[in-house]
Amino acid sequence: MSDNEAKRRLIEFLDTRAFDPVLKARSQDYPEAQRAKLEDVQGRTRAERERFHEYGSARKVVDMFKGDLSSAPAKKVHRDLEALGLPTLNQLRSEFERLADELGVG
């Protein structure tokens, strides 16, 4: 499998399982007190999604995914996402790593 195909599959996984659910969340489905938090995590998620799409290789996607699991800014976003009942990269870690292994970039 080509690196481009591996990258496409990793990005597709992240889009479908992590980014899209956050970006498609509707503010009216949340209490007023949580709407600002939702808007904040949606903005951060949008930026993160764009960043992942710009990485030049499947290896870079995997490396940055792993880095995002432990960075201080990402930990705050993960806490906010969990509080809103939305998926986090941490929750998807084992599935993502299994896919990366299957694609030969784990």
Image: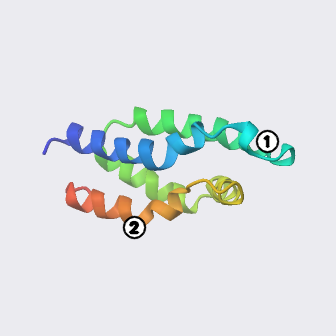
Q: Is residue 106 visible?
A: no
The residue shown at (21%, 39%) is 5
Secondary structure of residue under mark 2: helix
Where residue 94 sits, quadrant-wise, is: bottom left
Report the Cα–Cα distance between label 1 and label 2: 30 Å
The residue shown at (51%, 64%) is 91
What is the x, y in percent for residue 23? 58, 37
Label 2: few (<14), some (14–19) or many (≥20) C-alpha neighbours in 10 Å:
few
The mark closer to the camera, 1 or 2, is 1
Q: Residue placed farthest to the right in the image?
A: 33
The residue shown at (60%, 58%) is 71
Label 1: few (<14), some (14–19) or many (≥20) C-alpha neighbours in 10 Å:
some
Where residue 36 sits, quadrant-wise, is: top right
Specify the amino acid type for callout 2: Ser
In the rendered structure, the answer to whether residue 90 lies left or right of residue 84 reads left
Question: Tag on residue 62?
Answer: none
Residue receiving disc 1: 35
